[in-house]
Image (cartoon, grey):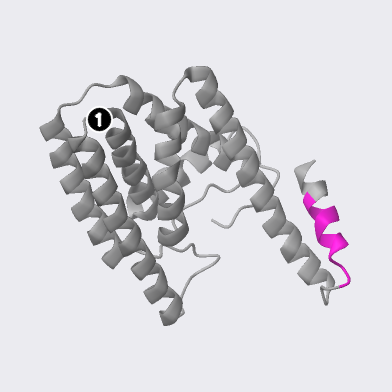
Amino acid sequence: MIEKIALNMAKGLGNTLDSEESVEIYAYALQGLLMLILNLILVVSAAFFLKIVPTTLVFLAVFIPFRAFGGGVHLSTFPRCIMIGSFLMLGSAYLAAEMSIETYQLALLCFFILLLALFSTIKWVPASTKKNPINDPEIIHRQKRNMLIATVTWAVCAYSFIYSNNHSLAFAMVLGAIVSIMLISPLGFYLMGAIDGILNKFGKGVLTHDA
């Protein structure tokens, strides 16, 4: 259904697009955007039901920019991305809301993740896929710079939450960074590849992603 909506929207731009290939590209991009919006709606709705809206929103406030600037692995179909992504988002938000953690533990964990984020920015950002590699030095430099700014902003906000005793929100920020960095790293590519392999045994997906 979403695929048809995206295709119709792209065809509606037919007067400004110069080829059928352009229509397909725009349709794919629009489908990705619609799936992202749907995913966020599902996650926030589930967060209301689970009563974890604050930690969910804080997690997303970290996860979205880190993924946008850092890149990283995707599963091979949009439905799989929604399923696993929703599990990671809601699971992390629920853990942050329910788990009790001491101030010094949070501070140390935040410091360790800050170092890991800086290392990941230097080493892997932007983490591109084999199908869509990023080789332009200007783009690479820009993404690293944006990721560095996002990381510093994250650290300032996380420590502010820690020392104002908003531990659940601070932990949500830490988990948002951990999940994002994992998906940027080679470990994330390996784990998502393994999950794809397992899911392939239950049938093929309906839409190829960019992994």
Question: Pointer 1: what residue?
Answer: 167
Image quadrant in which you'd find residue 139: bottom left
Q: Is residue 90 magenta?
A: no
User: Which residue is most to the left?
Assistant: 104
159 relative to 8 in the view: left or right = left
**Considering the image in quadrants, where does the C terminus appear?**
bottom right
Q: Nearer the viewer, residue 75 or 194?
A: 75
Q: Element under label 1?
A: helix
Q: Using residue 39 as the reference point, say whether residue 129 is left or right of it.
A: left
Q: Is residue 200 visible?
A: no
Look at 39% across and 31% down and name the residue there.
55
- The answer to whether residue 98 shows anywhere in this view is yes
Residue drawn at x 44%, y 33% as measured from the top left: 56
Residue 127 image point, x, y percent: 41, 62
State the extent of the magenta-drawn residues as a range.
Answer: 6-15
- Please tell me how crowded label 1 is: few (under 14), some (14-19), or many (20+) other residues with Cα within 10 Å: many
Q: Is residue 169 left or right of residue 210?
A: left
> Residue, x 58% and y 48% (percent of image)?
76
Quadrant in which residue 30 is drawn: bottom right
Residue drawn at x 70%, y 51% is 31
Vertical position of residue 132 compared to residue 187: above or below: below
Observer-nearest residue: 193 or 19?
19
- Residue 84 on image: x %, y %: 51, 36
Q: Tell me where residue 183 appears, x and y as whole percent.
A: 39, 49
Query: In this rendering, is residue 205 above or below 103?
Result: below
Which residue is situated farthest in the front direction here? 164
Q: From the image, which quarter does the N terminus lie in?
A: top right
> Percent from the top left, x then y, of residue 32?
65, 52
Q: Quadrant of residue 59?
A: top left
Task: State yes or no: residue 12 in magenta.
Answer: yes
Three-letter code, disc 1: His
Magenta span dominant secondary structure:
helix
